[in-house]
Amino acid sequence: VQLVESGGGLVQSGGSLRLSCAASPTTLRLNAMGWYRQAPGKQRELVATVTSGGSTNYADSVKGRFTISADNAKNTVYLQMNSLKPEDTAVYYCNALFSGAFEYEYWGQGTQVTVSS
């Protein structure tokens, strides 16, 4: 399974961006998708996740500003990011959990988000 991300870029503080991540077709069952980010010199951290049942989870730092959503029919996840802050600057990675005979975890290649002050 390949995850293809899009939507990163440069935006001013207070602006918005929308990230998308599409998984390639598969017979595996999609359990959850999400977004993680890694800033320079820091560990990768969870941003938001959504299960196939629609349950969502957010990092405290993005609650009220970011919204995760998914189109299960297309195995696609979106992250709407509003009121962006310079501290949101990071490489954002898409993550997907599938199940079949085993459980499988996949990562996207990452997309850069830069928020200028």
Image (spheres, helix red, strand yellow):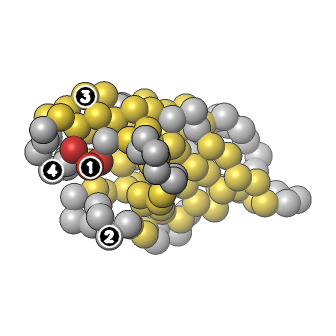
Q: Residue at x 51, y 35 (%)?
A: 110
* Relative image position of residue 21 (x, y in whole percent): 49, 39
Q: Label 4: few (<14), some or many (≥20) within 10 Å? A: some
Q: Give me the C-alpha separation between circle 4 and circle 3.
A: 14 Å
Residue drawn where x is 25% and y is 28% of the image: 10
Count neighbours of disc 2 (C-alpha within 10 A) and say few if under 14, some if 14 to 19, many if 20 or more: few
Cα gap from disc 3 to disc 2, whole angstroms: 23 Å
Secondary structure, mark 3, is strand
Residue sitting at 41 percent across and 58 percent down?
A: 47
- For badge 2, the amino acid type reads Asp
Q: Quadrant of residue 32?
A: bottom right
Q: Nearer the viewer, residue 7 or 14?
A: 14
Quick one: 105 or 45, which is closer to the camera? 45
Dot 1 or dot 3: first in sequence order is: 3
Image quarter where the N terminus lies is top right
From mark 1 to mark 3, how far is it between C-alphas? 13 Å
Gap in angstroms between the C-alphas marked 1 and 4:
11 Å
Residue 58 position (above or below residue 77)? below
Query: Which mark is first along the chain, 3 or 4?
Result: 3
**Residues at circles 1 and 4 in contact by the CB criterion of under 8 Å:** no
User: Which mark's residue is nearer the viewer, 1 or 4?
Assistant: 1
Q: Amino acid at mark 4?
A: Ser
Q: Residue furthest front?
A: 41
For disc 3, the marked residue is 10
